[in-house]
Image (tube, coloured by chain):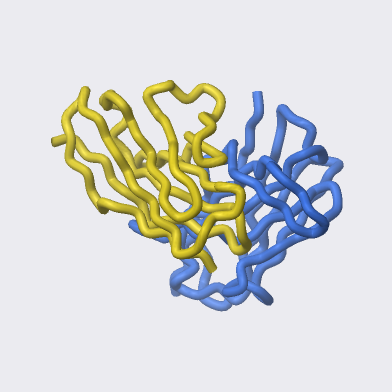
Chain colours: A blue, B yellow
Amino acid sequence: QVQLVQSGDEVKKPGASVKVSCKASGYNFMSHYGITWVRQAPGQGLEWMGWINPYTGDTKYAQKLQGRVTMTTDTSTTTASMELRSLRSDDTAVYYCARASIQLWLGDDYYYYMDVWAKGTTVTVSS
Amino acid sequence: EIVLAQSPGTLSLSPGERATLSCRASQSVNNNYLAWYQQKPGQAPRLLIYGASRRATGIPDRFSGSGSETDFTLTISRLETEDFAVYYCQQYGRSPLTFGGGTKVEIK
């Protein structure tokens, strides 16, 4: 069955970096699907962080995270990763990876919804 | 960016009742690219509806989505105990993808 499994919880100090991985299985990692990252601060709603197309390597990031976030994939291991740098206390959240099911693709623009989610990784930023 | 306003913030209902959740967009959502997700405490979100009205795989038919352009609705025809959760709408018709603030459906 389709499954996404994330790496374990992390505790980081302000200014540090964190890298969360997401291992995909049960589907063709490089066909018709991307990987998107969404985070949820404690008691808050969902925030889209960005996405990556494993086939092309194309990425798109939320403007507020530009310059601090990098998303990558390793197609040989069907693993996606998200690195967030210069961590602040307000980066404390549960980070989810999700499979992005592409409904339409026009040039560089992809229109997708998230049909399979991993369980999430808690990242705590505290001094 | 498109702002999604969900209402009400909290819906208090009894099992067996009908739930109607609203999601209003600040601009028209292209191609009605709107999804609904369910989230229970301590769990990841689960896709219920995409394309405004298409049920995702394995979702019971008591869940239905409707609407177009700026006004969308998620209806749960008869609430089961497992349906008490938080529901989020999300638009994917224009970048950046955005989520609504959520509606909590709680047991009355």
Residue in the picture at 74% in, 57% down: A109
Q: Residue furthest left?
A: B108
Where residue A20 sits in the image (x, y, percent)? 63, 54
Residue in the picture at 55% in, 73% down: A87
| Between A99 and A92, the one nearer to me in the picture | A99
Where residue A14 sits in the image (x, y, percent)? 52, 76
Give the quadrant of the C terminus of chain A. bottom left
Q: Is residue A17 visible?
A: no
Using residue A29 as the reference point, say whether residue A41 is left or right of it. Answer: left
Residue in the picture at 86% in, 41% down: A76
Count of labels in the image: 0
Using residue A39 as the reference point, say whether residue A55 is left or right of it. Answer: right
Q: Is residue B54 visible?
A: yes
Residue in the picture at 47% in, 25% down: B59
Where residue B34 sits in the image (x, y, percent)? 52, 47
Using residue A94 as the reference point, say whether residue A23 is left or right of it. Answer: right
| Between B19 and B38, the one nearer to me in the picture | B19
Give the quadrant of the N terminus of chain A. top right
Where residue A44 sits in the image (x, y, percent)? 37, 59
Q: Tell me: residue B105, above or below residue A85.
A: above
Q: Tell me: residue B87, above or below residue B13.
A: below
